Image (spheres, rainbow, N blue to C red):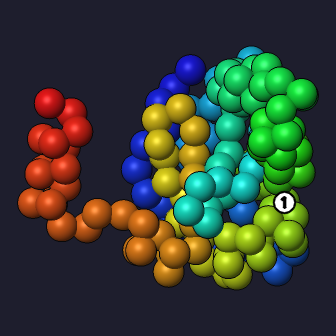
Amino acid sequence: MGMFNSRYECKVDAKGRLALPAKIKAAIPESNGSELYLRYGDDGCLALYTEVEFKKLYNQINSLSDRDPVLRKIKRSFFDGLVTVELDNAGRFLIPKNFMAFASIEKDAYVIGLGSYVEIWSPEKYENNVVSDQAELSELMDKYLS
C-alpha cells in the first residue's frame, strides 16, 4: 500500500462529489477496488480509509464488549458515522449531505494525506487544527518524539 501525504486544495461539485487528487488516488492499492470507507473524523473532519486500513480500525471497534454501556455507545456512534463510498471512473466519490454538514464543507475542501488514511477538511476548520509555525512544530516533535 502506498502512503498518503501532503495537502491538496480541492473543490466539491454541486452534487457533493469530490475528486481525489491523482497522487492520493495512485496510492490506493489496485486490490482495494473502487470502494472506500468514509467516517466522521476527529476534530470535525472526515476520515477516508482503504479497505485494509479500515479493517484494522473495524476490528478494534468491533472487539469492544457489548456488555459495557460506554463501549456500546462508542460502537453505536462509530457505526452511525460511517458510510461506504465508491470511486467513479473519474476518481470522484459522493460525500453524503450529513457528512458535508458535519465537516462544514461547502465548495472548497482540503484533502490531507496522513500516512495510512486521508482526512477531508473545510479550509477554515483545518487552519484551527494544524501547527503552522515550524518552530512550534519542532518543539512539539522534540517533546513527543524523543
The percent position of residue 55, horizontal first and vertical second, equals 75, 23
Q: Which quadrant of the view contains residue 101?
A: bottom right
Q: Nearer the viewer, residue 47 or 35?
A: 47
The answer to whether one can see residue 42 in this image is yes
Give above or below for 7 relative to 72: below
Q: Which quadrant of the view contains residue 134?
A: bottom left
Position of 4 with respect to 77 (left or right) is left
Q: Which quadrant of the view contains residue 25?
A: top right
- For the N terminus, the quadrant is top right
The percent position of residue 144, horizontal first and vertical second, equals 23, 39
The answer to whether one can see residue 87 in this image is no
Position of 61 with respect to 4 (left or right) is right
Give above or below for 24 relative to 52: below
Determine the residue positioned at 61% across, 62% down: 45
Q: Residues within 10 Å of mark 1 (few under 14, many from 20)?
A: some
Q: Nearer the viewer, residue 15 or 102?
A: 102
The percent position of residue 32, horizontal first and vertical second, equals 75, 24
Determine the residue positioned at 46% across, 35% down: 115
Determine the residue positioned at 67% across, 78% down: 104
Q: Amino acid at mark 1?
A: Leu
Residue furthest to the front in view is 68
Q: Nearer the viewer, residue 37 or 25?
A: 37
Residue at numbered disc 1: 94
Determine the residue positioned at 88% across, 45% down: 76
Position of 80 with respect to 24 (left or right) is right
* Kind of element beneath mark 1: strand
The percent position of residue 142, horizontal first and vertical second, equals 12, 41
